[in-house]
Image (spheres, grey):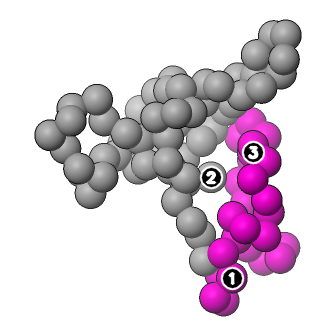
Amino acid sequence: MLVLVRDDDSSLGPLKWKTGRIVAVHPGIIDKKVRVCEVQLANGTVLKRPIVKLCPLPIYSDSVCVNEVLGSGDPKAGEDVETDEL
């Protein structure tokens, strides 16, 4: 899933935030809810960020939003969404 990584610098707007791809998720030990993800940036750097600082980007394929078709579930670690399967 492609995401924008929110920056702590309040002077930067969303157009200046970095883009990345979620490569791993870390569910909680007790409740199994995902609160932290590893995000790979375009330059190859992998960051560990809380999900409240990630903004998912909608992906459109033939006028259909892939994110809406797939639902709001969390991606599995390292899994990419293939639009050909829809």
List the residue tagged with mark 2. 1
**Amino acid at dot 1:** Val
Do the CB atoms of the residues marked 3 and 2 lie less than 8 Å apart?
Answer: yes
What number is the disc on residue 64? 1
Q: CA distance from mark 3 to mark 2?
A: 7 Å
Q: Is residue 74 magenta?
A: yes
Q: Which residues are magenta?
A: 61-86
Residue 82 visible, this orientation? no
Secondary structure under badge 1?
A: strand
Secondary structure under badge 2?
A: loop
Give the foreground label among 1 and 2: 1
Residue at screen point 84% across, 17% down? 31
Does label 3 or label 1 sit earlier along the sequence?
Answer: 1
Q: Is residue 21 left or right of residue 76?
A: left
Q: CA distance from mark 3 to mark 1?
A: 19 Å
Q: Residues within 10 Å of mark 1 (few under 14, many from 20)?
A: few
What number is the disc on residue 75? 3
The percent position of residue 61, horizontal first and vertical second, equals 65, 81
Q: Judge whether 33 appears above or below 4 on screen.
A: above
Secondary structure under badge 3?
A: loop
